[in-house]
């Protein structure tokens, strides 16, 4: 059943005075800005996110040039200072190198959508992450899937990335003011509640292995100055709740 009219409206007016006034440099202007929350993220995920934010900060995209997240940030291996952190894999949470980096790529992706950038390559996660609306995530895997964007402007755009107490913030900075209104909306056309499964464990108490997340089929739209376009259609299976019962 289509759940028509269920919209997650998250937009920003790009290039208006309130945003420009926030810049320290009068010769630069915020084209777009987006923040994802850090609430609920583990220490290891935050560590990896911080390293990727530091690698991303200061990157420059040439006029009409293409940007690659993987080429810019580089690998997220132990040699690069990254640690193992929770990621979703085959329906379960497992620790893997660089867990948490995808929050940085997702934050950039949303800033790019709001900034009017063309999306050259983007992949969803298997399960919808909790730090952004469904259909608005951007998964990356070094040597595999990438986030690639194209600068639509005739001037260079720099990326300002930072980690604050509240969350990750990515801003796109240009030398000119761009007056346009951008709105992102997501229509959830299918919602699937997670089920609960019990498995027998060996510990003295019950333990929740996975807390569970709903599944979605979602259509994401971008409206620029009143003109709407379909950005993506994504399907996420439910992440079922798994309860490990105490051993006998």
Image (cartoon, helix red, strand yellow):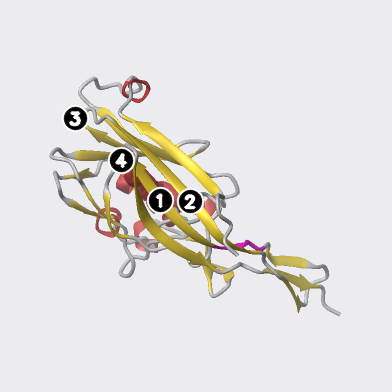
Measured in 3D between alpha carbons, the distance from the residue under mark 1 to the one under mark 2, in whole angstroms, is 6 Å
State the image coordinates of residue 69 (x, y, percent, origin top left): 29, 55
Measured in 3D between alpha carbons, the distance from the residue under mark 4 to the one under mark 3, in whole angstroms, is 14 Å
Q: Nearer the viewer, residue 83 or 128?
A: 128
The residue that label 3 is drawn on is 175
User: For the residues carrying marks 4 and 1, which lies nearer the camera in this image?
Assistant: 1
Measured in 3D between alpha carbons, the distance from the residue under mark 3 to the one under mark 1, in whole angstroms, is 28 Å
Q: Where is residue 224, by image quadrant? A: top left
Q: Which element type, helix, strand or loop, lies under badge 4?
A: loop
Q: Which element type, helix, strand or loop, lies under badge 3?
A: loop
Q: How crowded is the residue under tag 3: few (<14 C-alpha within 10 Å), some, or many (20+)? A: some
User: For the residues carrying marks 2 and 4, which lies nearer the camera in this image?
Assistant: 2
User: For the residues carrying marks 2 and 3, which lies nearer the camera in this image?
Assistant: 2
The residue that label 4 is drawn on is 115
Please say if the residues under marks 4 and 3 sit with CB atoms less than 8 Å apart: no
Q: Upstream in the sequence, badge 2 or badge 4?
A: 4
The residue that label 1 is drawn on is 221
The residue that label 2 is drawn on is 186
State the image coordinates of residue 228 (x, y, percent, origin top left): 35, 47
């Amino acid at each position: 059943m289509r759940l028509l009219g269920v919209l997650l409206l998250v937009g920003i007016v790009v290039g208006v005075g309130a945003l420009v006034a926030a810049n320290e440099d009068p010769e630069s202007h915020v084209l777009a800005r987006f923040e994802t929350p850090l609430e609920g993220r583990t220490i290891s995920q935050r560590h990896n996110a911080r390293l990727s934010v530091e690698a991303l900060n200061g990157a420059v995209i040439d006029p009409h040039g293409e940007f690659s997240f993987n080429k810019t940030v580089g690998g997220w291996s132990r040699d690069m200072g990254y640690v193992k952190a929770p990621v979703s894999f085959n329906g379960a949470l497992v620790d893997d190198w660089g867990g948490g980096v995808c929050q940085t790529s997702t934050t950039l992706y949303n800033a790019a959508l709001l900034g009017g950038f063309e999306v050259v390559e983007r992949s969803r996660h298997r399960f919808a992450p909790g730090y952004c609306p469904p259909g608005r995530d951007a998964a990356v895997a070094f040597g595999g899937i990438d986030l690639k964007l194209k600068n639509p402007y005739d001037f260079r755009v720099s990326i300002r990335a930072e980690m604050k107490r509240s969350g990750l913030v990515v801003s796109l900075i240009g030398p000119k003011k761009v007056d346009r209104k951008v709105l992102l909306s997501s229509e959830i056309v299918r919602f699937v509640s997670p089920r609960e499964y019990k498995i027998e464990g060996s510990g003295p108490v019950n333990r929740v292995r996975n807390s569970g997340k709903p599944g979605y089929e979602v259509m994401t739209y971008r409206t620029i100055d009143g003109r709407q376009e379909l950005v993506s259609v994504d399907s996420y299976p439910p992440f079922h709740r798994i309860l490990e019962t105490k051993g006998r």
